[in-house]
Image (cartoon, rainbow, N blue to C red):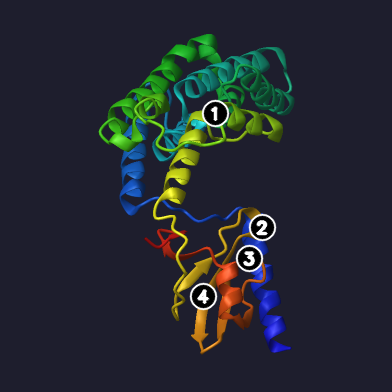
Amino acid sequence: MKLFDKTQMYYFLSETLKYLGIEANSTSKTEKVISGIGAMLGILLCQLVTLQYFDSNESLLLIASMGATATLIYALPHGALSQPWSVFGGHFTSAIIGILSYQYIPESLIASSVAVGGAVLVMYFLRCLHPPGGATALFCTQGGDTVHALGFNFLIEPLLQNVIILIGVAVLFNGLFSWRRYPAHLNFRHVKSQSPSVLSHEDLSAALLQSDSFVDVSTEELAIIFDRAMTHANTNNTYKKLPLKQACFYSNGALGEGWNIREIINISNSTVTYKVVFGKDKGVIDECSQRNFRKWARFEVEYVQGSWIKTI
């Protein structure tokens, strides 16, 4: 009964993490530090420019919007929401809608709501969806007298300057690192396919369309990820008898909910005692014959930087 309760607890925690959207982060410490430094440089320059037009209190909403943009283009330089057209078009269309909302809707609460909702709608249709744009639209309605007095001049001073700074610094800063080149196409166009596949670029595009929901990944990036996965799958893809070792981890190589990772706790002459450490029935301890375990296991794996990968 205790084992059942413990298993249920593991399953509940696993499902809770999935519903919260907490996923393994496979980026290296170096990548995290680089992202932080880039965002720091970009937002520092934006603040210096913005404070030429507004005082520190008036600039808060706009700086917050630019901070969100900096997070995207320096931490996710290849994300679909981080690309130059999304940044430029997202902020400018949102600002225009925000200014019009303030000028033609006297009720502040309604004006700000229409501004944000309209910004999201127009950004979708213009293919420049950029979440910080919603904050820019809100700033145009709630930014105060100085912002309202600027009217459409706000598009140039300081919005255009901020956007140019963030994009320009992103191009220069990310360009220092071959794997982070920005815009993303500068990175993708140098990557060549390494493995044949029954799936095509068009198949991946069709899959994204069928989801009917915006996914922050381009078909180019998805194709590269898939190609690298295929290359890795074909590396050392032998069919020798899989050696079973105590305290080592094994995967069934499945996708989605069927994926399972087991740790061998003990090996006897004919049986294997294992613990499910990831996937369905996480926390369960069970045993089976060595023959059945080998039928289930496709390869040995190890935990590296937050992800399970094949042991080479």
Residue drawn 74% across the image and 23% down it: 107
Residue 83 appears left or right of 100: left
Identify the amino acid type marked 1: His
The residue carrying mark 2 is: 257
Q: Position of residue 284 (x, y in %)?
A: 64, 78
Q: Are marks 4 and 3 in contact (CB under 8 Å)?
A: no
- In this rendering, is residue 215 above or below 153? below
- In this rendering, is residue 56 above or below 107? below
The residue carrying mark 1 is: 201
Q: Which of marks 4 and 3 is nearer the N terminus?
A: 3
The residue carrying mark 4 is: 263
The residue carrying mark 3 is: 14
Q: Position of residue 170 (x, y in %)?
A: 35, 29
Q: Estimate the spatial distance between the alpha carbons at disc 4 and disc 3, rounded to whole Å.
A: 17 Å
Q: Earlier in the sequence, mark 4 or mark 2?
A: 2
Q: Are marks 4 and 1 in contact (CB under 8 Å)?
A: no
